[in-house]
Amino acid sequence: MTIIERRRFLLTATALAASSAFSGFALAQTQPAAPKIKIDDKSVLIVVDVQNCFLPGGSLAVGKGEEVIPIINRLAKSFVNVVMTQDWHTPGHVSFASSHAGKKPFEMIKLPYGDQVLWPDHCVQGTDGALIHKDINIPHAQLVIRKGFRKTVDSYSAFREADRKTVTGLSAYLKSRGLTRVFVTGLATDFCVAWTAMDARREAFEVSVIEDACRGIDTQGSLAKAWDAMKKAGVKRIQSGDLAV
Ligand SMILES: [Zn+2]
């Protein structure tokens, strides 16, 4: 190799090394993966409304709702603290389309406390449809909060009813147990999960919604709107794989 050839070889080798070191590919390889979120004794898993009515064959089935069950069961094994919720309506509940002459499910009406989406009859107290699905396997869950049990007020949120005044007691329960980090899963993302997560933020909890452990109804753009509102409220959007379980 002549001196000129040798110099050209060295320059080329240097340029190659430099370009690979600064390429996005090289950076992606060298950046450490984000650390997994640790579940501690201040963490609580909230499993929202995984009830027969909201699952395939139910009167208000959420598309692919059954897919959350194995994910939630697996996650729950890593949580010492688990709370479940149950939609729990009276017959003839104000949120049922059948309670309003001439109205159909998914129409909106005005009630004294604000706008209300009308639903097919669902989760009537004491019926099979209101039971938590048999495949949910979380025997160590400590509390089941029943909500929407007043005939004239709905409650998507596990914390505060739709009149935005009446509380369920969940906030006080969690605070008195020293639980400050809330992880929300279940059905449906754009209603009971979103309202629960945003109310938890209002109550000053640290809140994450585990997206792949939830499924949405998505009526009239409700799913995108809910994620937007949750983001504004400071709710973290995470995946089950982000957790150290
Ligand atoms: Zn309901």
Image: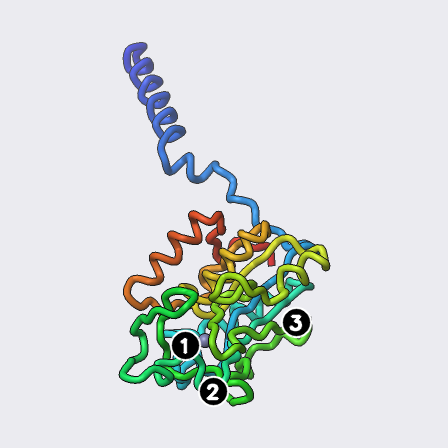
Alpha carbon of mark 1 to alpha carbon of mark 3: how far? Answer: 25 Å
Residue lying at 59% horizontally and 50% vertically, measured from the top left? 204
Question: Which residue occupies the extreme bottom position in the image?
Answer: 127
Q: Kindly identify the amino acid type of the residue bearing the numbered disc 2.
A: Pro
Residue that mark 2 sits on = 91
Residue that mark 1 sits on = 95
Percent of width and height locating residue 111: 39, 70
Tag of residue 143 = 3
Q: Would residue 77 appear left or right of 29 to someone viewing this image?
A: right
Q: Tell me which numbered mark, 3 or 2, is placed earlier along the sequence.
A: 2
Percent of width and height locating residue 226: 39, 58
Query: Which of the image's four quarters has the C terminus?
Result: bottom right
Q: Tell me which numbered mark, 1 or 3, is placed earlier along the sequence.
A: 1
Asked if disc 1 is less than 8 Å from ligand 1, the answer is yes
Above or below: residue 37 compared with residue 129: above
Above or below: residue 25 compared with residue 181: above
Q: In this view of the protein, which residue sits in the foreground, 153 or 66?
A: 153
Q: Kindly identify the amino acid type of the residue bearing the numbered disc 1.
A: Ser
